[in-house]
Amino acid sequence: MAVYGRIEEVSETIQSNEIENRLDRNLESHVEKEEQVAFPFFRLIIGSTIATVFSVVLPLLLDMVSPSQAQDLYIGWALHQGGQLYSSYYASHGLIYYLLLYITQGGILFALVEWLALLGGGYFLFSSTEYLTGQREQAKQLLTIFYILVSGLGFGGGYATILALPFLFAGFSFIAAYLLNPNHDKGFLRLGIFLGLSFFIEPITSLLFTAVVTIGLFVFNVGHGRFVHGVYQFFAAALGFSLIFYPVGYYVLASGGFGGAIGSLLYPIDSLQVFTNPQLMDNVVFYGLLTFGLGALFLVFLGLFQSKASRLYVISVPASFVFLFVLALLLFSQEPLHGSRLILILPFLLLLLMTSIRGEHSGRIARRRRREEVPTLWKKFMRGNLYLPILVVVYLIAVPFVARFVLHPASYSEQHQVVDRIKQETSEGDQIYIWDSHVQIYKESQRLSGSMFPSPLLYTNTEENKTSLINDLKENQPKVIVVNDKVALWSEVETLLKENYQQVKTDYSEFKVYKIKQ
């Protein structure tokens, strides 16, 4: 009877455990379904729409696109007229990016492309954050901050970086899953594919982002005794990258633009001036104050010195150093000042925000237990920086409006008069040149630039590019050259105008029009 009783007790225990396990599985299934329903699709759609309106729609409709972005939009239209990318047009970004501009012809339809990119970027940013930290509510807050930053930093420019974000964070989501549970090597082939796609959209940002995750994975694997796994992951990612790189790279090579592509990739480094940069103080004041206002330096400090889980620390440290490197590129750059150039820091700023969240879980079940009180990201970032990030965003949006409608209304109105005059003095197929930063005049007048550098103020801070521009003007002999009096003429161009061009009588206050001598 005693034995029978013990068997009965064991049986009851087994049944009890089965019931408990079944209840646990049902509970987990219920939680999973609840979380799927709770995924912030509405926030993604609304945030993407607002950010697209501010970054693309308003600047395009109101003619407030940044000079560098206007050049990219011009290339998207000009490719329909003929010529090859990197050889006929100076392209500072990747082939896929210009393919999208070509498809949309550099017009308002591009807003749809960015909307989809912001939707995908937000989705993978949220997923990565939840994987890495387990804090769903804080991941939602990061999503809100992301769209706020894009609205300001991306106002009128930086579209290539924005389009690269969904691929960068899609790849990072695999890394986040691995850092949370390093008992698998899944997704690294796809990681390489995503990084390859982002590289052919925005090369510099993608290479630096790759450096961050590579260093982070290496340190994590060495620290966890998984060096061999790290080697496998590297080769798997390299294979995925090559699946994109070789076909696209072969196309660029076959089209004769490989040298130009390499030159544009190295330009940000080749054009730097550290001690003899006449624009250094302006850069320090402009980009330095904006970066400080964004709370970025505070986040760098947290990234380097905040106590956190190792999976967060191995990302925050390299992200901090790469962030400072990108900031140095901006400070020592000689390109025209524009707030949208700060979009380059956005991917690394997001990583620092993500890793500043305190993750508290170490497994699947533990991820369900997220009710503990933790400092909110919004409070830490916005209130901790006295809401200066909001002020920076408002400033970046307001300044173009002030410049457009208050400070320089005559300049913008004269642009349209110049367009009409160009159409009078030239025929379809004639080339012109605009000695100014307003390269949108080309597209508005339906005339191609007489040089692969549509503006003398963009990408001409190396002797090679400067010489190329002068040679283009001499060889192509644009029928009309429009000169903004506020933009200094190079001595070589002054000589060219005196010898080969005659000034057209106009009543413009800022522009002079020169027509080639017959």
Image (cartoon, helix red, strand yellow):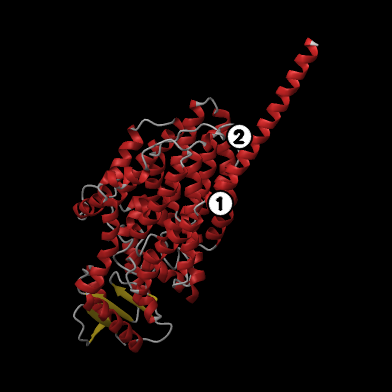
Mark 2 neighbour class, 10 Å CA radius: few under 14, some 14 to 19, many 20 or more: few
Q: Which residue is mark 2?
A: 184
Mark 1 neighbour class, 10 Å CA radius: few under 14, some 14 to 19, many 20 or more: few
Q: Is residue 241 visible?
A: no
Q: The residue tagged with tag 1: helix, strand or loop?
A: helix
Image location of residue 332, percent across then percent down: 27, 50
Residue drawn at x 54%, y 37% as measured from the top left: 178
Q: Which image quadrant for residue 375?
A: top left
Q: Please determine whether, in this image, residue 502 is positioned above or below residue 5.
A: below
Q: For this view, does 340 lie left or right of residue 254?
A: left
Quarter of the picture containing the N terminus is top right
Residue toward you, 415 or 169: 169
Residue drawn at x 32%, y 44% as measured from the top left: 379
Q: For this view, does 365 lie left or right of residue 355?
A: right
Q: For this view, does 101 lie left or right of residue 242?
A: left
Image location of residue 359, percent across then percent down: 44, 35
Task: Give the tally of numbered discs.
Answer: 2
Q: Which mark is residue 37?
A: 1
Q: CA distance from mark 1 to mark 2?
A: 28 Å
The amino acid pointed to by label 2 is His
Q: Is residue 214 visible?
A: yes
Residue drawn at x 50%, y 36% as measured from the top left: 369
Q: The residue tagged with tag 2: helix, strand or loop?
A: loop
Q: Which image quadrant for residue 191?
A: top right
The amino acid pointed to by label 1 is Val
Q: Please determine whether, in this image, residue 49 is positioned above or below residue 184.
A: below
Q: Which mark is residue 179?
A: none
Q: Earlier in the sequence, mark 1 or mark 2?
A: 1
Q: Are marks 1 and 2 in contact (CB under 8 Å)?
A: no
Image location of residue 286, percent across then percent down: 23, 54
